[in-house]
Image (tube, helix red, strand yellow):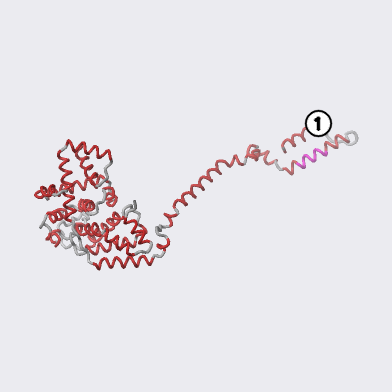
Amino acid sequence: MKCESNRKRVLLAQSGELSWLGKRTLARHLRACPTCRQFESDLRGLTHQARAAASEVEISPAVFERIRAAARRENSRSELIHIHPSREPFSITFRPAIIYTAAAILLLTGFWLTLRPVLRQPQMAEITAPSSTVEEWDTAGIDSQIENLNDRLDLAATSEDTIDIENTDIDSIARELLELEGQQI
Amino acid sequence: MESPEKAWLDEYRRGNVDAMGKLVEHFRRPIFGFILKMTEGREDAEEIFQETWLRAIRNLDSYRDKRFISWLFRIAQNLIIDRARKAKPVSDPHPAGPDQPGDPWERIPSPGISPARQVGGRDLGGRIAKAVSRLPREQKEVFLMRMEGDLPFKEIAKIHGTSINTALARMQYALAKLKEELREDYRDIAGGQP
């Protein structure tokens, strides 16, 4: 098991992908293990020979010419390339902007939903009052009631002796009036 | 530091067609070497090389890989597989059974009839090439991508859509098989290193 993982380390060391710690572990193992040392030596030798054997490979000039022609054609076709050297598709270019906008919309919606009752606090009476009271909250009706009671109060106070007010009681009218005014406030 | 291929790509994107020529020349050896060995010296190796570059040029906008060479290897690998799939079997040494879909790679002409393989064997390099050609496809790909393209295992794994451990295991199997095949030559191989 130790040798197996260290052989992977040998391969990774050769491709330059081994960490500093991995190199240290491997060096320690190689000092103690002749089989893995042989594996490393074989790999180095084979790599050298295989790369040396991969001598110059010739390709006919016609192939290069065709690639060049295609490159020229493609380059002139996409004139935008000249304007935007590192042109990227819309989705890539604007991706951050789209993400930020979506996040901002979500945040604002969240705020609005959370803070809506707080923002509407001045109308708290509307929320807390029982439904029957809310229905009576017709200001025009209250105004007219107050006006009516004021008239009756004035009448009772000034003409108590001469005008007969049925069941008139100044105190009860005044109490009613105060109650109504209290509601209005 | 900016890699030369990135500078050439930017130059090409700015309209300099010669920069593409420099790129083709720069990657000629690893890419063509890979194609040549994967197709075992078939005549269409040049065609595949050309098609690799044409595809790369056409799809340059979709190029996202960190390393341009990895992208080229991926295109070349796909083209080789496509060709092998389309090719009519010249000789079919491992016919697929009724339950086996069959590996298109098996339809590649037998190594025994390849002219490249006939010239191989004259020297150590030739014998190594011959032994490499006998490796199973995945092992051969990993071995050649390492040797020809000097690709790191992380990139090789990405090209194959596997884990780095799988790529490393394939390389280990390839090395073990080559050692077995080249038993007689291993003294020279170990002695030939710098």
Q: Quadrant location of the N terminus of chain A?
A: top left
Name the side, left or right, on which A93 lies relative to A112.
Answer: left
Q: Which residues are magenta?
A: A143-151
Residue B153, horizontal then vertical, whole percent: 26, 48
Report the residue marked by disc 1. Answer: A171
Name the side, left or right, on which A184 lies relative to A163.
Answer: left
Query: Which one is nearer the viewer's eye here, B192 or A100?
Result: B192
Furthest toward the top, the residue is: A171
Residue A32, horizontal then vertical, whole percent: 17, 35
Residue type at the position of mark 1: Asp
A146 inside magenta stretch: yes
Query: Which one is nearer the viewer's eye here, A147 or B136?
Result: B136
Q: Is residue A170 above or below residue A107?
A: above
Q: Quadrant location of the C terminus of chain A?
A: top right
A79 inside magenta stretch: no
Q: Is residue A132 above or below residue A87?
A: above
Residue A85, horizontal then vertical, whole percent: 40, 59
Residue drawn at point x = 60 percent, y = 39 percent: A118
Name the side, left or right, on which A50 lies relative to A100.
Answer: left
